Image (cartoon, helix red, strand yellow):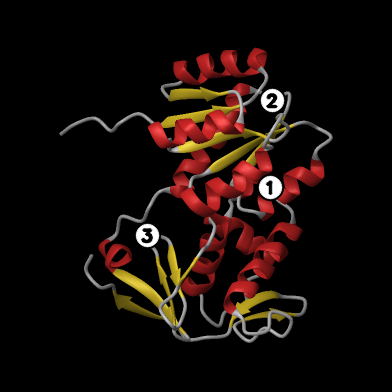
Amino acid sequence: MTDAAPTTLLLVDDERSLREPLAEYLTRQGFVVHEAESAAAARTRLTQDPPDLVLLDIMMPGEDGLSLCRHLVESRHLPVILLTARGEAMDRIVGLEIGADDYVTKPFEPRELVARIRSVLRRAERPTQPQDVELAYRFEGWTLDPLKRRLTDPEGALIPISTAEFRMLRAFCDHPRQVLDRDRLLDMVQGREAQLFDRAVDNQVSRLRRKLEVDSRNPLLIQTVRGGGYRLAADVTRIAKDPV
């Protein structure tokens, strides 16, 4: 039996005075840390040695952190924790809406960051039970693959889906036709450690509706229950995936 490989982090921040001491601290905590001073450098590093999680500053010269965050969650499906300044509340909200997993506000306590890293990694772990590996969700012709985190429409086309959208849709598929209020969705999708906003839930639901519904303004699949929350108005079955 071999020891598990250490977790690899990519720390993206243009402030060298913050980046280097933080990288040293995280290394002492048992992580393998790669550094990038810009989004361009981060993109290069991603092709060389993909990390398990990205720590990403929002305000950087050139391509900003929000643009890189969108690429990370939609194209590479990597967990992202945003590093933000106190005055960037709207940027934090936008980052969470496009799929970031969490954020910490500068200046922050390094021990808190480590706790959030471990929390996000736990939530990002792929399911290990055989039924989760072998079975996909099927509803109204749509298919959600829980292992590859892929969404396929009724015609068989692959629909891009962020990590946050995947978690939200999976929560609905695990509880079809049940009313899920915002607090319960936050617990299932992001975890209470993040102290997220109700608005983040509403925006993720809106993004899912734009992908699933014929008319997102008059949703038939993900319905709003006044005073209650949201409900997936469809029967869900678990099906064996085609072998790869």
Q: Nearer the viewer, residue 174 or 56?
A: 56
Q: Amino acid at mark 2?
A: Phe
Q: Quadrant of residue 144?
A: bottom left
Crowding around mark 1 (Cα neighbors within 10 Å: few <14, some 14 to 19, many 20+) is many
Tag 2's secondary structure? loop
Measured as percent of width and height from the top left, residue 140 is found at 48, 86
Q: Which residue is mark 1?
A: 95
Q: Amino acid at mark 1?
A: Gly
Question: Does 130 appear above or below 43?
Answer: below
Q: Is residue 229 visible?
A: yes
Q: Nearer the viewer, residue 106 or 157?
A: 157
Q: Which residue is mark 2?
A: 108
Q: Which residue is mark 3?
A: 148
- Residue at image position (68%, 55%) is 97
Q: Amino acid at mark 3?
A: Lys
Tag 1's secondary structure? helix
Disc with the residue nearer the chain's start (2 vs 3): 2
